[in-house]
Image (spheres, rainbow, N blue to C red):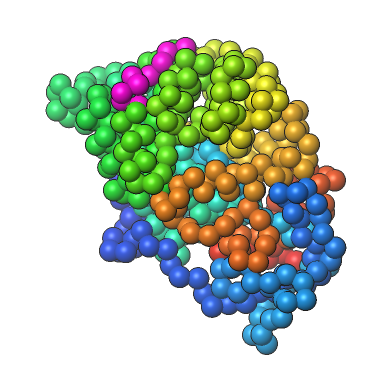
Amino acid sequence: MSRACRIRRVPLLATLLALLPFAGAFAQAPAADNELLFRDVRVLDTARGKLGAPTDVLVRGNLIAAIGADARPSSAATIVEGRGRTLMPGLIDAHWHSTFTALSQADMLAPDATPEKLAATVAAESRSTLMRGFTSVRDAGGPVFELKAAIDAGKLSGPRIWPSGAFVSQTSGHGDLRQPHERSRRFFGKPSLAEEMGATFIADGRDEVLTAVRENLRMGASQIKLMAGGGTSSAYDPVDVTQYTFDEMRAAVEAAEDWGTYVMVHAYTTRAVRRAIEAGVKCIEHGQLLDEDTLNLMAERGIWLSTQTLRASTEAMDPMRKEKRRPVIEGQARTIAAAKRAGVRIAWGTDFLFEPALNHEQNEFILGLREWFTAAEILKMVTHDNAELLALSGLRSPYPGRLGVVEPGALADLLLVDGDPLQDLEVLADPERRFAVIVKDGRIVKRAD
């Protein structure tokens, strides 16, 4: 996170919440009793890296009902002519910030900023994310519950969201987003603006960590995001510092496990990650400064590495952030290669923050994985593997069912793609032209065929 979050209070999410009644806001709207038949398509099996022979695929309601000879639709079915094109699972971004990727510092600090204007920007970006073929995202922290509720209720258009809720951070940690004049809530009794807007919990000590985690679970978090080490975009903490004691981190894990879910942590360094692993954390976000022994330990214990293809800088990045990011970028290629050799379970996400201009490059960032992975491995990662990471939420998953595959019984999140991504991965980077049909939850949300 960055100074961008240190703004005067703008009740953005209160405006989103006003789009629907609070009662039942967290219940997903039932899927329509519809039928879709994809005729003459080649199914991409991303788990095995194979493109099948031409066939038909029947969607009934929000599930894939049948493939091949068993795909017999009713007379009321909507027919989509595949003409030999590729049918594949929807894309998944495992590290997305639904609100903070839509808004820049300038947006939030503008004199004419209003809750309605900012909410409209977030809603528009939510729809654009879905139109890029990302049918699911794991929100890695920030105000998101009301946005998710509005999407699930059909009031807004957007991907499925696995929400983490407010970051859980120690004082002076990566999620301490206070303005310089804001003093500690614990000593002076006043929450910071970032806490009030649902961006973060500043929680110190076992008891406060337990309360923060449980508050997020109360609001519908599917997993918990904890800050375990220093960050490149935060003002108070050097990248090398370790955040949270073992007891504090263990408290978060215990509270999450009691609800049948898990903790993911922001961390780069070996020391921070080792402590997180011993505390029972299931997923490490970033990790670009890890050594091979720690990566081997992660592989041995089945700990996920949720990585990104970060760039050294962007036009919007301030000098402090560029300098703090330098060692992370230097370690990125080495760490991802070593993680692959070690057999670590690897997920992928973008982690865009406060730079809306980057959002239209979300698909292109997938291509950055080609330095370490084949096209088949990348396609598996951004669909099947990311879906398995989402499934760690267990009963806390907001969307029961299987994602990341095109199989009978799986949830119908699908892309009809013009081209073969196994042979030409760059088709993923041009969703406007190459994604002819996008289906989320059994409904066509884009059709340009």
Asked whether 6 or 296 is in front, the reply is 296
Q: Quick check: can you spot residue 162?
A: yes
Instruction: Identify the image quadrant of the C terminus.
Output: bottom right
Q: Is residue 112 magenta?
A: no
Instruction: Identify the image quadrant of the N terminus.
Output: top left
From which residue to which does the magenta span run? Answer: 239-249
**Left or right: 427, with 343 as reference point:** right
Which residue is drawn at the image coordinates 54% and 43% (left, top)?
A: 389
**Left or right: 56, with 31 as reference point:** right
Query: Magenta part mainly helix, strand or loop?
Result: loop
Marks counted in the figure total 0
Which residue is drawn at the image coordinates 58% and 48% (left, top)?
A: 387
Q: Quick check: can you spot residue 105?
A: no
Vertical position of residue 142 compared to residue 324: above or below: below
Asked whether 206 or 172 is in front, the reply is 206
Q: Position of residue 37 (x, y in %)?
A: 70, 74
Residue, far front = 300
Q: Position of residue 393 (x, y in %)?
A: 45, 47
Asked whether 154 or 344 is in front, the reply is 344
Vertical position of residue 214 compared to residue 410: above or below: above
Which residue is drawn at the image coordinates 56% and 19% (left, top)?
A: 294
- Please identify the quarter of the rendering in which residue 237 is found: top left
Which residue is drawn at the image coordinates 50% and 71% (left, top)?
A: 31
Asked whether 26 or 154 is in front, the reply is 26
Q: Position of residue 55 (x, y in %)?
A: 80, 69
Q: Position of residue 159 (x, y in %)?
A: 53, 54
**Left or right: 95, with 254 as reference point:** right
Vertical position of residue 372 compared to residue 220: above or below: above
Q: Is residue 243 magenta?
A: yes
Residue, far bottom = 75
